[in-house]
Amino acid sequence: MPETSASTVRPPALIRNEPVQARSTARLAALLDAAAQVVDEIGYERLTTAMVADRAGASIGTVYRYFPDRIAVLQSLAARNEERISALVLAEIRNGDHATWTDAMVAVFGIYVDAFRVQPGFAAIRLGDVLDLRPAEGTPQNTVLADRMFDALVARYGVIDTEAARFAFDAGHELTDALVARAFARDPEGDARYLSQARRALRGIAANDIATA
């Protein structure tokens, strides 16, 4: 029997908050590092809390001190991914080294691809939207990040903030995420063909849907 099912877990927003206060501790970081390594090797579907404990060299009781079940582990790993990637991409947009917003987004694309290559577990979990937790509640994390990036582009590059432009940016972010994920589905370095299509998607948004003041 699985440790929990998608239909019986509490809403993701609540699960994500459980380990937040202890996130800075070395023990929690070690548990999440262990979970990421296991996910990298066998996928998130087969992850168990026992595997996390074994890989971290910890007792199962230690795991349950932080996480009520395997879903909470996955949600917390996704939350850490989100925290890390958000900090990197927002800093890149705001750093002032890029002449245009499209230049900034090309750099952001590179950061995202690097996360797939070097950050354990990121290719499988990303921001957590791939986890099938029902009933679905709240705003998808991809959209949350897209909104933050769009706000940064408005502030830094004068991108015109309209509902249509924001939706186009969100849709483009989803498309790019899907194409990059496909690029890494069978190739740890990323299939160049899919990565090229993802870059074309970015250029399409710039050409057709978003303008600056």
Image (spheres, rainbow, N blue to C red):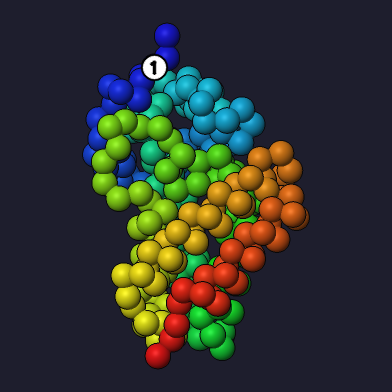
107 in relation to 44, above or below = below
Which secondary structure lies at badge 1? loop
Q: How many marks?
A: 1
Residue 192 visible in the current orientation: yes
Nearer-the-camera pick, 151 or 122 = 151
Q: Residue at x 40, y 86 (%)?
A: 158
Q: Residue at x 51, y 26 (%)?
A: 45
Quarter location, residue 188 = top right
Q: Residue at x 28, y 32 (%)?
A: 135
On-image quarter of the N terminus:
top left
On-image quarter of the C terminus:
bottom left
* Relative image position of residue 206 (x, y in whole percent): 53, 75
Q: Which residue is mark 1?
A: 3
Quarter location, residue 19 = top left
Q: In the displayed structure, does residue 28 sit left or right of residue 200?
A: left
Q: In the displayed structure, does residue 174 sit left or right of residue 71?
A: right
* Relative image position of residue 204 (x, y in whole percent): 57, 70
Residue 24 visible in the current orientation: no
* Relative image position of residue 6 (x, y in whole percent): 35, 25
* Relative image position of residue 12 (x, y in whole percent): 30, 38
190 in relation to 170, above or below = above
Quarter location, residue 98 = bottom right
* Label 1 Cα crowd, 10 Å radius (few <14 / some 14-19 / many 20+): few
Looking at the picture, which amino acid does disc 1 mark? Glu
- Which residue is farthest front? 208
Q: Residue at x 56, y 49 (%)?
A: 178
